[in-house]
Image (tube, rainbow, N blue to C red):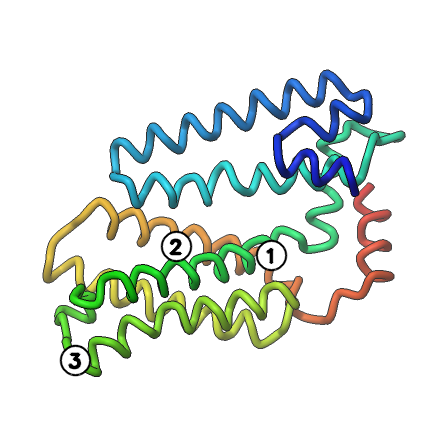
């Protein structure tokens, strides 16, 4: 656990304390590369996109290398390969997406509270008043519900997410025809499509509760 905490603070540090110097240097290099890529994409698309790309690219890797430190050295295979197999078999990737949704809910709520005058595009309209507040509040509410469901791998979470994705993509496409293309709108639309494809690919994670015993069997089978 100590190594995982150290790697969560500074990528590669936990591996270094375990005597895995090569892995530590590799993980630091990958982290710096992903951060630089996030900053570069952010400069093209704007500050908001910079944070978005960091959450999408660098943060998942940050979590994986910390989990690698938690698992410790591998006896039978390459450390990173072993770690990814564990993440896949135990559906930690879905749980991580759930954490991202909860983080997005907090971020959305903060933006709404700090910018009460902002009118969110809603199917070619920008409603104000109570209706405008409700359309803005819909995003953090759905993010919270989906995030919790993903963390718990609930069956209903997949259905709620598909409703959310359908609403989000339909709204984005309709707004695209009315307000024209925008960097943030285009980025979110493409990312939502990619997220949805990935979650549909991993839909079996939601079919039954993943107990510790089941996840261990899946991990051993994948190894």
* Tag 1 residue: 94
Q: Is residue 21 above or below residue 59?
A: above
Disc 1 and disc 2 in contact, CB within 8 angstroms: no
Give the structural element (helix, strand or loop) at label 3. helix
Q: Nearer the viewer, mark 1 or mark 2?
A: 1
* Tag 2 residue: 193
Q: Nearer the viewer, mark 2 or mark 3?
A: 3
Residue 21 coordinates in the image, percent (x, y): 74, 17
Q: Badge 2, how many Cα within 10 Å: few under 14, some, many 20+? A: some
167 relative position to 102: left or right: left
Between discs 1 and 3, the one toward the N terminus: 1
Between discs 1 and 2, the one toward the N terminus: 1
| Distance (Cα) linking label 2 and label 3 | 31 Å
| Distance (Cα) linking label 1 and label 3 | 36 Å
Q: Is residue 153 above or below residue 69?
A: below
Quarter of the image for residue 114 reads: bottom left
Question: Residue drawn 71% across and 22% down?
Answer: 23
| Distance (Cα) linking label 1 and label 2 | 16 Å
User: Looking at this view, is 48 or 110 the one in front?
Assistant: 110
* Tag 3 residue: 129
Give the structural element (helix, strand or loop) at label 1. helix
Point out the residue furthest to the right here.
Answer: 75
């Amino acid at each position: 656990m100590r190594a995982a905490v150290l790697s969560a603070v500074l990528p590669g540090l936990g591996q270094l304390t375990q005597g895995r110097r090569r892995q530590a240097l590799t993980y630091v290099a990958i982290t710096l590369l992903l951060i630089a890529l996030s900053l570069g994409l952010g400069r093209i698309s704007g500050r908001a996109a910079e944070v978005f790309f960091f959450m999408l690219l660098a943060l998942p890797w940050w979590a994986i290398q910390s989990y690698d430190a938690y698992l410790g050295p591998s006896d039978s295979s390459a450390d990173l390969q072993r770690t990814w197999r564990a993440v896949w078999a135990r559906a930690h990737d879905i749980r991580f997406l759930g954490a991202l949704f909860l983080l997005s809910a907090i971020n959305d709520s903060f933006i709404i509270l700090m910018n009460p005058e902002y009118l969110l595009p809603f199917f070619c309209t920008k409603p104000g008043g109570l209706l405008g507040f409700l359309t803005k509040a819909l995003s953090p509410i759905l993010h919270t519900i989906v995030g919790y469901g993903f963390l718990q791998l609930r069956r209903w979470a997949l259905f709620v997410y598909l409703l959310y994705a359908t609403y989000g993509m339909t709204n984005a496409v309709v707004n695209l025809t009315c307000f024209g293309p925008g960097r943030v709108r285009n980025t979110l639309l493409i990312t939502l499509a990619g997220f949805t494809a990935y979650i549909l690919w991993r839909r079996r994670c939601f079919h039954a509760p993943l107990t510790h015993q089941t996840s261990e069997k899946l991990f051993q089978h994948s190894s």
